[in-house]
């Protein structure tokens, strides 16, 4: 009887139709085992990032070739794909169907998908068939009747997630040794594992300069009261920087950690308009009718008493550029005198 053949090329897989009633398995050479060693880089998570934050996600599945010419698998061949890491099912932190694998680092989990089988739905039945491309680990897959494949490459996707508090004082935590996936074939046994051989988790943060550098003095200049001509009129802006030191941001460009700044009034200053960034003068001032408006680098108002994302984290020292100016408050003509305002600043890391 003539044998009919067809082929699909996709993701380094050659696929053919085979007659039924052949051995239900794959022709793995005796003792075959492939260890896929993977580096994930030095990953950083913001100290104050909310639970559920993605630390790093691959934009697409990455692949690795494990055989030069391909290994023949016949209809009914089965792969059981799992991980030795503890599992969290039905977590609200991930989409339905995703299973979180708990790493050995408290507060850090990873979602993994991977396959040695074809990606076409008509070729294999995948149970439960959830997660990324239906290959979310754990699962098992069986080649459908009448389908044979020659496999030569595997694909893996992962997404690291903050699943709980991460201790900022724990230091660098190695990811090496975490087994993300194990592939077992019904005839070939354990044929492949995917293991992290290098990479780490760190908490992104910066230090503040020692005193007196922690006090940022902004000379506001001397102005005539005639400079003001009605409520909301302003003087020229005075620029300044909030310095932070020894920041850690990691080496992976997919890390998106930011420093956020919160300003709260001090020394008798009050909030006159939080969204417009306007502070009242402090207790040692005797001028009236003016306040101090705090601005971001683009000269838009800096909201007060809330965390505002300012700069993306980078390794080393950095400055957060800002500006300030006097602004007339109320309709009464300002009265000259000492005009100081004070705020405390708090840095957080998202």
Image (tube, rainbow, N blue to C red):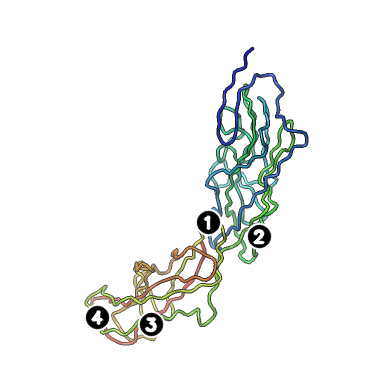
Which mark identifies residue 253?
1
In 3D space, how far apart are the residues under numbered discs 3 and 2 (Cα atoms)?
44 Å
Label 4 sits on a secondary structure element that is helix
The tag earlier along the polypeptide, 1 or 3, is 3
344 vs 19, left or right, is left
Label 4 vs label 3: CA separation?
17 Å
Q: Is residue 125 above or below residue 39?
A: above
Q: Residue at x 55, y 38 (%)?
A: 133
Q: Nearer the viewer, mark 1 or mark 3?
A: 1
Query: Crowdedness of circle 1 by 10 Å Cα count: few (<14), some, many (20+)?
Result: few
Q: CA distance from mark 4 to mark 1?
A: 48 Å
Q: Position of residue 175 (x, y in %)?
A: 66, 55
Q: Is residue 82 left or right of residue 262?
A: right
SS of the residue under disc 3: loop
- Determine whether the residue tagged by mark 2 lies in a helix, strand or loop: strand
> Which is more N-terminal, label 4 or label 2?
2
Give the number of the disc on residue 173. Answer: 2
Q: Residues within 10 Å of mark 2 (few under 14, many from 20)?
A: some
Query: CA–CA distance between discs 2 and 4?
Result: 57 Å
Q: Which mark is residue 227?
A: 4
Hey, which residue is sitting farthest top in the picture? 1
Residue 312, percent from left and from top = 48, 63
Q: Earlier in the sequence, mark 4 or mark 3?
A: 3
């Amino acid at each position: 009887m003539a044998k009919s053949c067809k082929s699909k090329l996709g993701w380094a897989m050659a696929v053919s139709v085979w007659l039924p009633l052949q051995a239900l398995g794959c022709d793995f050479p005796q003792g075959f085992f492939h260890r896929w060693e993977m580096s994930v880089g030095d990953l950083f998570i913001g100290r104050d990032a909310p639970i559920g934050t993605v630390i790093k996600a691959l934009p697409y599945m990455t692949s690795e070739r494990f055989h030069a010419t391909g290994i023949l698998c016949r209809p009914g061949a089965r792969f059981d794909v799992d991980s030795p890491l503890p599992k969290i099912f039905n977590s609200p932190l991930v989409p339905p169907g995703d299973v979180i694998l708990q790493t050995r680092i408290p507060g850090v989990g990873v979602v993994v998908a991977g396959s040695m089988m074809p990606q076409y739905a008509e070729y294999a039945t995948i149970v439960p068939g959830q997660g990324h491309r239906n290959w979310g680990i754990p699962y098992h897959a069986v080649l459908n009747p009448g389908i044979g494949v020659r496999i030569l490459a595997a694909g893996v996707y992962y997404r690291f997630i903050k699943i709980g508090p991460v201790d900022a004082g724990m230091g660098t935590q190695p990811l090496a040794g975490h087994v993300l996936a194990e592939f077992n074939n019904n005839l070939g046994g354990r044929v492949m594992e995917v293991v992290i051989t290098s990479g780490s988790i760190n908490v992104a943060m910066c230090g503040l300069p020692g005193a007196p550098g922690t006090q940022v003095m902004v000379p506001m200049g001397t102005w005539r009261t005639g400079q003001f001509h009605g409520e909301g009129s302003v003087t020229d802006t005075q620029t300044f920087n909030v310095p932070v030191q020894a920041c850690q941001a990691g080496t992976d460009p997919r890390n998106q950690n930011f420093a956020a700044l919160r300003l709260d009034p001090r020394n008798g200053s009050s909030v006159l308009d939080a969204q417009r960034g306007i502070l009242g003068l402090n207790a040692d001032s005797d001028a009236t009718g003016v306040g101090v408006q705090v601005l971001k680098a683009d000269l838009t108002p800096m909201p007060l008493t809330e965390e505002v994302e300012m700069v993306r984290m980078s390794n080393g020292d950095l400055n957060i550029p800002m500006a300030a100016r006097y602004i007339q408050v109320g309709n009464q003509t300002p009265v000259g005198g000492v005009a100081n305002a004070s705020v405390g600043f708090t840095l957080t890391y998202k």
